[in-house]
Amino acid sequence: MLFSQNTAEKFEGTPGYSFLKYNYHECPNSNLDPEDGIETHYDKILLCSRCGNQITSYSEGATIHGSFEHSFLNPDGIMYQIGCFKKAAGCISSERFILEFTWFHPFPWCFVFCSDCGRQLGWKYKSNNNDVFYGLILKLLCSM
Ligand SMILES: [Zn+2]
């Protein structure tokens, strides 16, 4: 059994739990053993799937507007599945925050990129108190 009842009770309600439960073993570049449980992976680092740069970890997952995971359409009609993170040390950002088309009203956003290969990995959001969080495109991240 992949996730024991005790494991489920321990992590239920934790940001990122449902994503990790259903998706962590599907990452194509991952060497995780799907028979392992969530406890061994919860602190796993998330890498840029293109270059392997360390981006963040599941333990940095954040609940924003009631959920870790969100799906949004951009103005060009492209669907993005993103996860919210408190920190993403492997990202650099444009730091030019704009409010237009924000997915997390009232927070303005800017682009974030892998600090190693430069691929866009998602967006950074800033609150009125200058708190920040990251919305990262989940399919572009892999577990180590
Ligand atoms: Zn990269």
Image (cartoon, helix red, strand yellow):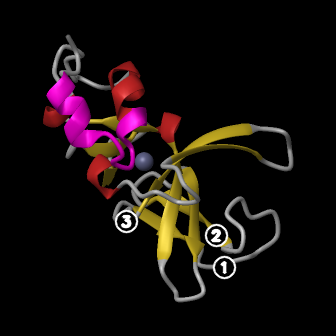
The answer to whether marks 1 and 2 mark residues whose Cβ atoms lie closer than 8 Å is yes
Tell me, for residue 44, which label it has, or none. none
Mark 2 surroundings within 10 Å by alpha-carbon count, few (fewer than 14), some (14 through 19), many (20 or more):
some
Dot 2 falls on a residue whose secondary structure is strand
The residue that label 1 is drawn on is 96
Disc 3 versus disc 2: distance between alpha carbons? Answer: 15 Å
Identify the image quadrant of residue 124: bottom right
Is 15 one of the magenta-colored residues?
yes
Is 90 one of the magenta-colored residues?
no
Q: Is residue 40 left or right of residue 95?
A: left
Mark 1 surroundings within 10 Å by alpha-carbon count, few (fewer than 14), some (14 through 19), many (20 or more):
few
- Give the magenta part as a residue range: 5-19
Q: Residue at x 33, y 48 (%)?
A: 14
Tell me, for residue 110, which label it has, or none. 2
Mark 3 surroundings within 10 Å by alpha-carbon count, few (fewer than 14), some (14 through 19), many (20 or more):
some
Sequence-first tag of 3 and 2 = 3
Dot 1 falls on a residue whose secondary structure is loop
Q: Is residue 7 left or right of residue 64?
A: left
Tell me, for residue 87, which label it has, or none. 3
Position in image of residue 55 (x %, y %): 35, 53
Position in image of residue 129 (x %, y %): 53, 89
Disc 3 versus disc 1: distance between alpha carbons? Answer: 18 Å
Mark 2: which amino acid? Cys
Residue situated in front as seen by the camera: 131 or 122: 131
Residue 105 against residue 32 in the figure, above or below: below
